[in-house]
Amino acid sequence: MANRNYPPDHPPFAALPVRTITIGTGADQMAVHISGRLSSRRVPIICVPGYQRNMTDFTDFIRYFGRLAGESWPVILVDLFGRGRSTDRSDKLRYASPQDAADLCTLADALGVERAAFVGQGYGGQVSMALAARRPGLIAGAVLIDAGPLSDSRGLVRLRGNLQHIAGWRGEAVLRAGMRQILSRDYPGLTDPQLDALALRTHFIDKRGRAHALFDPHLLKMLDSFEADDVLVAQWPLFDALQHIPLMLFRSQLTDQLRRETFEAMTRRRPEAPALIINDEGSPALLNHPDEVRAIVAFVEKLGKTGKVAA
């Protein structure tokens, strides 16, 4: 699968076995986990992770969703190219949200999905907006979590610094202490073992005490040009591509990816969209509280049916 090495028994991957879908050339393999059963009776959910992250961020979500909506409801988790168990891009210029959106179109076609609800965290939400601009008929509804038309440059710089620190640390004890410190800022209520489990979603530690990223290192290089005081341009036309699509908005209270004023501007632009705050968490949202997942279940249940292309 991924042309990066990772332990075959890596704990976060164990609960999410994947199949691979060829996107483009035979060498381009996208990792997909499907729970439930694809059919025309229920709109499937496609979950899209954040910038350098992978499907393990939806581990708790998929479990709670199954309990609340029924285990047969189809939920599709994906690793975008260069992340998790999907292959890295040979052409690094193709690491861009429009290309990722195009890949999701191809994936949906391969799975026979005509319409789906998309749940996007951070960069995954931006990919969902790009998908709406490209193929709006595919989106039955969208849930944006810490995602909008404008990223917070301070969050991008912090992410770059954190990933650089992790790459430079040596020794398992040093790595665990450092990663706990990084993550505790976003998740102050978690215990050390819980923080350790979160750290393993994006890295594994080898026998020599070095951390290895579960994403293409080029994604880190792409953050080099950002400065904390950069004034980025809001991409409101992309957000407005969702204007005729049912929408739900979430913002984590401690996120540094989406500023509060941007979130508030989004709610003013879409006043009918449910807008919720996830307390005492940063990004990515853990989605491990029944109230949050229950809200998404209620939103998706209102979207009606979607078709799966008959074999």
Image (cartoon, grey):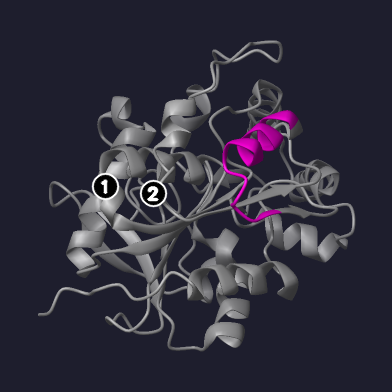
The quarter of the displayed image where residue 94 is located: top left
x and y percentages locating residue 84 in the rendered image: 45, 53
Q: Residues within 10 Å of mark 1 (few under 14, many from 20)?
A: some
Q: Amino acid at mark 2?
A: Leu
Is residue 289 something one can see in this rendering?
no
Question: At which x and y percent is residue 260?
Answer: 75, 34
The residue lying at 49 percent from left, 76 percent from top is 301
Circle 1 is placed at which residue position?
Answer: 103
Closer to the observer: label 2 or label 1? 1
Check disc 2 and report its element: helix, strand or loop: loop
Q: Is residue 107 visible?
A: yes
- In which quadrant is the C terminus drawn? bottom left
Precedes in sequence: disc 2 or disc 1 = 2
Q: Which residues are magenta?
A: 261-275
- Dot 2, crowdedness within 10 Å: few (<14), some or many (≥20)? many
Drawn side of residue 110 relative to residue 191, left or right: left
> What's the residue at 47%, 56% (across, down)?
246
The answer to whether marks 2 and 1 mark residues whose Cβ atoms lie closer than 8 Å is: yes
Q: Amino acid at mark 1?
A: Asp
Residue 40 tag number: none
Q: Is residue 61 magenta?
A: no
Residue shown at the point (74%, 50%) measured from the top left: 172
* Image quarter of the N terminus: bottom left
Label 2: which residue?
Answer: 80
